[in-house]
Image: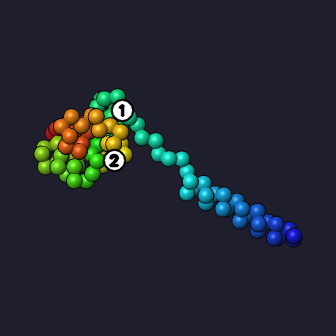
C-alpha cells in the first residue's frame, strides 16, 4: 500500500469513528427532583409535558412553563392537580 493510500485510509477511519461518536453519544440524563423548590432551580416556572399543557397554564393565569416531556415524565409526582404541568407558578 502506498503512503498516500495509507494516509487516506487512516483519515477515512478517523472520520468514520468521529461520525459514529456524534451519532451514538451519551444519552441525556433526566433529573428526578426531590421537590418543586429543587425543580425551580433549573426550570423557573415548572415543566409541562406538552405545548398544549403549557398553553393551558398561560390561559389560566400562570407563567409559561418549559416544555420538557422527559423531565415531566420523571417528575409527574409533582403535578398535584394532574393538569400536565409539574410545579407551575401563578402570576
Residue 91 image point, x, y percent: 15, 39
Residue located at (31% from left, 29% from top): 35
Q: Of helix, strand and loop, which one carries label 1?
A: loop
Q: How far apart are marks 1 and 2 (CA)?
A: 14 Å
- Closer to the chain start, of discs 1 and 2, is 1
Q: Do callouts 1 and 2 mark residues in contact (Cβ within 8 Å)?
A: no
Identify the residue at the far left of this view. Answer: 60
Which numbered disc covers residue 80? none
Quickly name the residue at label 1.
33
Residue located at (82% from left, 66% from top): 6
Is 39 on the left-hand or right-hand side of 3?
Answer: left
Q: Of helix, strand and loop, which one carries label 2?
A: loop
Q: Against 63, is 38 above or below?
A: above
Quickly name the residue at label 2.
68
Q: Residues within 10 Å of mark 1 (few under 14, many from 20)?
A: some
Would residue 15 be visible to someone looking at this image?
yes
Residue 89 image point, x, y percent: 20, 37
Q: Quadrant of residue 24?
A: bottom right
Residue located at (20% from left, 40% from top): 82
Q: Against 88, is 15 above or below?
A: below
Would residue 63 be visible to someone looking at this image?
no
Q: Quadrant of residue 34?
A: top left
Residue located at (40% from left, 37% from top): 31
Q: How crowded is mark 2: few (under 14 residues within 10 Å), some or many (20 or more)?
A: some
Residue 3 image point, x, y percent: 86, 68
Q: Against 35, is 65 above or below?
A: below
Amino acid at each position: 500500500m502506498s503512503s498516500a493510500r495509507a494516509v487516506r485510509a487512516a483519515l477515512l477511519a478517523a472520520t468514520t469513528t468521529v461520525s459514529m461518536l456524534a451519532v451514538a453519544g451519551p444519552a441525556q440524563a433526566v433529573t428526578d427532583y426531590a421537590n418543586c423548590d429543587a425543580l425551580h432551580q433549573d426550570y423557573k416556572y415548572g415543566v409541562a409535558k406538552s405545548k398544549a399543557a403549557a398553553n393551558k397554564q398561560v390561559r389560566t393565569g400562570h407563567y409559561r412553563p418549559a416544555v420538557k416531556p422527559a423531565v415531566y415524565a420523571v417528575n409527574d409526582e409533582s403535578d398535584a392537580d394532574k393538569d400536565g404541568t409539574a410545579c407551575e407558578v401563578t402570576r
